[in-house]
Amino acid sequence: METQSVPVDFLPIIFQVIVALGFVVVTLVATHFLGPTRKTADKLSTFEAGVKVVGNARQPFSVKYFLVAILFVLFDVEVIFMYPWAVNFRELGMTGMIEMFVFMATLLLGFIYILKKKALDWN
């Protein structure tokens, strides 16, 4: 027997979204009107973890920084896929082991490619 969803079934979800958005709006408006508005030169200046500001914030910086960050996220997310495999290692048997070796070989090939292209060299 197939169950059918009716619009009334979604009312709790819609109500929760409205309450959450309402809370955000009320909090932002309340802090804007109730908070202190003392503007000083120190508060209006750029802050970078205690380091004195030098130059313009719009200066370009190397694409290598973004490349390393993207590669880190890519390999980090792929390693996360190994945790469910480790938890279910016994149930997956030899087939699961072979699939993980293929997955790790693919990761290793990608890593070797990155090293050959010298994507991780900062110079």
Image (tube, rainbow, N blue to C red):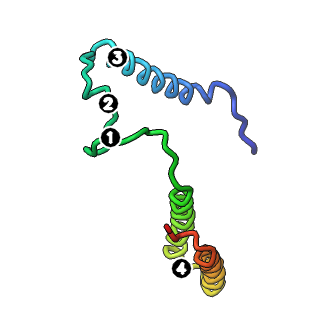
Measure how far apart labels 1 and 3 are at the Cα level. 28 Å
Q: Which residue is mark 2?
A: 45
Q: Indicate the position of residue 17 as horizontal and vertical percent values.
A: 52, 27
Q: Are marks 1 and 2 in contact (CB under 8 Å)?
A: yes
Q: Which residue is mark 3?
A: 32
Q: Which residue is mark 1?
A: 53
At a point 31% along the width and 37% down the height, the residue shown is 47
Residue type, label 3: His
Q: Secondary structure at mark 4?
A: helix
At a point 48% along the width and 24% down the height, the residue shown is 21
Query: In the shown orientation, is residue 29 left or right of residue 101?
Result: left
Asked if residue 108 can be seen in this view, the reply is: yes
Q: Secondary structure at mark 3?
A: helix
Asked if residue 96 can be seen in this view, the reply is: no
Q: Earlier in the sequence, mark 4 or mark 2?
A: 2
- Furthest-top residue in view? 33
